[in-house]
Image (cartoon, rainbow, N blue to C red):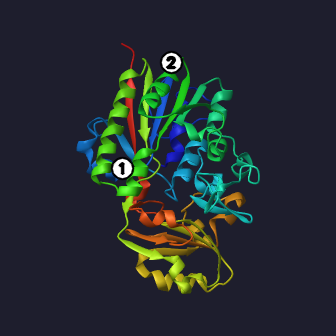
Amino acid sequence: MTIAAVVPSLLSGLEVPGADNTLGLPPARRVVLLLVDGLGHELLRTYASHAPFLAGLPGREISAGFPSSTATSLASVGTGLLSGEHGIVGYTFAVGDEVLNSLTWSRAGDHRHDLRKALVPEVVQPHPTLFERAAAAGVAVSAVAPLLHRGSGLTRAVLRGSWFRGAAGFGDLALGAVAAVQQDRSFCYAYHADLDTIGHIYGPGSEEWLLQLEFVDSLASRIASRMPEDSLLVVTADHGMVTADERIDFDTEPLLWQGVRVIAGEPRVRYLHTESDEVLSVWREFLGDRADVLTREDAVEAGWFGPVSPLAADRIGDVVVAMRDSAVLLRGQAEPTWNAMTGFHGSRTRAEMAIPLLIHSVTSV
């Protein structure tokens, strides 16, 4: 089971037509879905002593899908589809002649170049969202997320249909989520970003990351303690994370440039739009056992992206490079922000793809 099944399973308990409870989640009239960016299943299991509330909740392991990237997983949450159908196929990907940074909805490498007019979010991701379907069925749907996400391209693309409440920190995230589910048949999606940010900078398992995990555990506990009767708190994540132990710089390897027209993706998964059939063999020989290098057709046939629509196919690129173990493929000059980072995600390892699905029920007294 994947993250795409979470919201449909929850909406089934809220009597939304067509919502299928494939995960067998308990029904409730009031639901908060808390998504903790970067809280991988293996990380939570390894560092359970730092998150006693979360580690003590009943639940199961599910998959984030591929690529194990934030925008992709959030799109799966919002649409109930995998990347091959909703088309948000990674952190950056080609849409026509542009390479879109899907988190900032700007030109890749230039955050000042807003693409919301040129690449209209509702066109880039045209499928109706589950939030729209729930609202049409009479459910009070809310999203509580960082203030800067209000009206963003990604919010418009994958969270439309929800009433947005901006949060500046832990306090208003917790209270905003609880306030959103006080009425009958209400659903709130709440998002916390900082564990992922700390993991990128210092690495998962670092002292800084562990302290942030403790804060996240307290956040979840405080939300749970304030939930009304007949409600459900579900906690999940968008991906896990690995610490890079080998760094390969595309920008300093001229051999890798040959025949590559566009390179997109992120350090753990790359999409190559090519001008030469030799790219596949060159990259396979160069990376060896450090990566799985497949043609788009082979990656699709292997089921990496789930069912693939024409919308998504061209965005995937001619060659897909999924890094193994803990190697990363950087672009030292073109993407300097990644150079100083320690933690990464996006590829197909269990550490990146396995995420928790945790359940806290509040029943009537």
The residue located at (54%, 78%) in the rendering is 251
x then y, percent, for residue 195:
40, 47
Q: Which mark is in front, 1 or 2?
A: 2
Instruction: Please name whichever residue, 207 or 96, is drawn nearer the observer in this view of the structure.
Output: 207
**Is 23 above or below relative to 308?**
above
The residue located at (42%, 50%) in the rendering is 196
x then y, percent, for residue 127:
69, 45
Number of on-image labels: 2
Place residue 92 in its image quadrant. bottom right
Question: Mark 2 — residue?
Answer: 182
Residue 217 appears left or right of 107: left
Q: Residues within 10 Å of mark 1 (few under 14, many from 20)?
A: many
x then y, percent, for residue 105:
64, 52
Question: Mark 1 — residue?
Answer: 41
x then y, percent, for residue 244:
37, 66
On residue 108, the disc is none
Residue 110 appears left or right of 69: right
Residue type of the residue flagged with mark 1: His
Q: Residues within 10 Å of mark 2 (few under 14, many from 20)?
A: some
Distance between the alpha carbons at the discs numbered 1 and 2:
30 Å
Instruction: Please name whichever residue, 20 or 257, is drawn nearer the observer in this view of the structure.
Output: 257
Q: Secondary structure at mark 1?
A: helix
Let me know if residue 58 appears in the view.
Answer: no
Disc 1 to disc 2: CB gap under 8 Å: no
Place residue 326 in its image quadrant. bottom left
Residue furthest top in the image = 365
